[in-house]
Structures are given as C-alpha cells and as structure tokens.
Amino acid sequence: MFAASKIQRRAFTASARNLSKVTVLGAAGGIGQPLSLLLKLNPRVTELALYDIRGSPGVGADISHVNTKSSVKGYDASPEGLAAALKGSEVVLIPAGVPRKPGMTRDDLFNTNASIVRDLAKAAAKHSPEASLLIIANPVNSTVPIVAEVFKNAGVYNPKKLFGVTTLDVVRASRFVSEIKDTDPKDENITVVGGHSGVTIVPLFSQSSHPDLSSDAELVKRVQFGGDEVVKAKDGAGSATLSMAMAGARMADSVLRAAQGEKGVIEPTFVESPLYKDQGVDFFSSQVELGPNGVETIHPIGPVDAAEEKLIEACLGDLKKNIEKGVAFVAANP
Ligand code: NAD
Ligand code: LMR
C-alpha cells in the first residue's frame, strides 16, 4: 500500500514536471490548423493554446474533441485573448502572416509580415518571455532578427530560446534524395544550412551517404526552391501548409523532448550563431543540439566540397541583407 502510493507520488511528480503548454499564434491558418492538430496528437503537449485574429475559438472547439489527454482552448481575437494564450507557455509557434502567391519572393512578404511578427513578439516578450519561440512566418531570415530585436528592447532576449523553423528544408531534401535513390527517406539525413529562402538554403550532400549528389545542380536547386514548387502548384491559394505543419510539429517535439531531458536531440534551425559573425551574419542555420535550456551546442558546418563552398558564399551575401533588413525595421518601427 505504502509502496503503491509512493510510486503514484513519483509518477505524479514526473508528469507535473513534464506539463507543457504550447501556443500557436496564427492557429486558424493553412499551417496553423494542421499544426495544431498534430500538436494535439503529441503526448508531450499537455495544454494547447490557439490564437488567431479570426477563427481560433472554432478551431479550438473542433480539435478539442480529438480524444487525447491534452486540454485545448481557442482564444478570442483580443489583447486579453493573446495574453492568456501566451501566459505560462513553454513553446510558442508563430505561423501568423500572409503566404506567397506565384511570382513573389519571400522577401516580398516583408512589408505585411514584419509588423505582424513584431506585434506578436511584443506580446510574447510581455506574457511568455521564457518560452522557446519557433518562428515560421516568412521571410524567416528577417522575422527571426525582428523577434530578437523586440526581445532585446523589452530586456528579455535569450538567444538560446529563439529558433527560425527551417525543418521543412531538411524534410524536403531527405524526401527528394529518397526519390532519386529509391531509399527510405527516414535513412536520408541531409544537412541543410544557411537561411530559409532561395540561394540562402544550402544542402550539403557531400556530407550525406550520397556525396555524388552535390554536383546534381537540379537537385540542389529543387531543395533551394522547393517552396516555389508548391506555390506554383497551389496557383494563388498559398504556399506549403501540410508539409510545413509536419515540419513545425517535428521541431516543436524536438524542443520538448530536449526540454524534458532527452540527450542528443539535433535539429537544423536558424539561430543566433557564431559561425559567420565575423562576416556580419549574426543568424545562421546549422545542426543545433537542443537541451533543457534551448540551444545547447551549435555545430560547425563541417567539411564541404568546392561546389558547396560557392553555395555558402552566395548564401551569406543575401542572408546578411535579409538580417539587416529585419534589424533596421525594428529600429525604425519599435
Ligand atoms: P494563412 O494565410 O493560411 O494563415 C495565416 C494565419 O495567420 C491566418 O489565419 C491569419 O488570420 C493569421 N494572422 C494574421 N495576422 C495575425 C496576427 N496579427 N495574429 C494572429 N494571427 C494572425 O498562411 P499560411 O499558409 O498558414 O502561412 C503562414 C506563414 O508561414 C506565411 O508567412 C508563410 O510564408 C510561412 N511559411 C513558412 C514556412 C517555413 O518553412 N518556415 C513554410 C510555409 C509557410
Ligand atoms: C516554403 O518553403 O514552403 C515556405 O517558406 C513557403 C514559401 O513561401 O515557399
């Protein structure tokens, strides 16, 4: 009897430690809805908070009927709703913002999405300053620095907790390679570094089990412009949503697993990084080991071949401008 209650108490303590509130801002959108559904299926998420400027109570009610243990609430579109959605959150995902239409670059989204992300970051800095922030809204190369600047202005910036979500690039690379090589994508771990747009996306096939692929210009281009493939196929109805939801849910799960003590959790993600700081590039995506406090170790790029060296050079030029644009936006529009 005594032993049983001791075991019960221990079980309770363990689960109390693992209570994880996860918030999605932009939860009623093309990404937000399937992402929220996938998070509802994740047993590590104990409370799911959904916020959008329209439609989140409905999405919340719908998802709340899924028979997993977590609680779900869709909050009203109001400052109070946003504050309540964020309060006590451990992970905040931000897919709020407009998607591309054919012919647009991600940078063309800057004018609309910069202020959306800035305002949501202000709310997060106030109501969930210690959460891990996973930024999905494009252009990621600029929206991540925007969030950093907002958090700095609020005096709560922790670079270990700010992540640009570039998971979709590695998901694509792995799938595209598996199609060429007729392999299982789960065995194809392709490192992709840099940023998240066009030439700033740099797959490092020389480090994979198919080093020959680094000279496959068509494949490299397909990884760099995979997003355009979807934008074109959707023909004006937006960009990747379902594959992005899967990629965002994977990244959130990795952050939670590491927070709960799992070792060796590595994801590529766009973070404040020392790797190219000497060239004025303060944020860069590479393999990052996650831990209980967010970023644990930023892994170096590792050996690359001559073709990849050139890709990195092209990446750094664009990336620097994208980052500076985000920083300048917050300086001019705090
Ligand atoms: P969408 O238009 O379908 O959904 C966006 C949602 O954001 C809408 O429901 C809208 O109401 C909401 N929203 C707008 N302003 C808001 C605010 N201030 N607060 C809360 N919610 C707000 O778009 P989508 O297809 O879901 O794409 C969202 C963003 O994600 C786009 O910027 C897109 O480019 C980006 N994206 C990034 C990646 C990546 O790999 N990082 C992949 C795909 C898409
Ligand atoms: C993607 O890579 O699919 C996203 O960044 C959306 C886009 O605009 O391509």
Image (cartoon, helix red, strand yellow):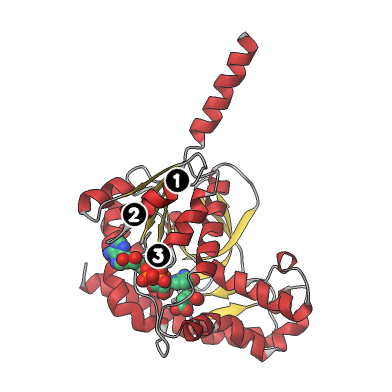
Q: Nearer the viewer, residue 257 or 79?
A: 79
Comparing marks 3 and 1, which lies closer to the viewer?
1
Q: Quadrant of the C terminus?
A: bottom left
What residue would you read off at disc 2?
58
Residue for point 70% across, 88% down: 216
Q: Quadrant of the N terminus?
A: top right
3 and 2 marks in contact (CB < 8 Å)? no
Question: Would the CB of label 2 be found within 8 Å of ligand 1?
Answer: no
Secondary structure under the numbered disc 1 in the rendered image: loop
Label 2 to label 1: alpha-carbon separation: 12 Å
> Residue 65 has which mark?
1
Instruction: Determine if residue 274 is in view.
Output: no
Q: Nearer the viewer, residue 329 or 245?
A: 245
**Crowd band around label 1 with a 10 angstrom C-alpha radius: few (<14), some (14–19), many (20+):** few
In the rendered view, would you say 293 is above or below 232?
Answer: above
- What is the x, y in percent for residue 6? 59, 16
> Residue 95 has which mark?
3
Q: Amino acid at mark 2?
A: Gly
In the rendered view, would you say 3 is above or below 80?
Answer: above
Label 3 to label 1: alpha-carbon separation: 23 Å
- What is the x, y in percent for residue 106? 41, 81
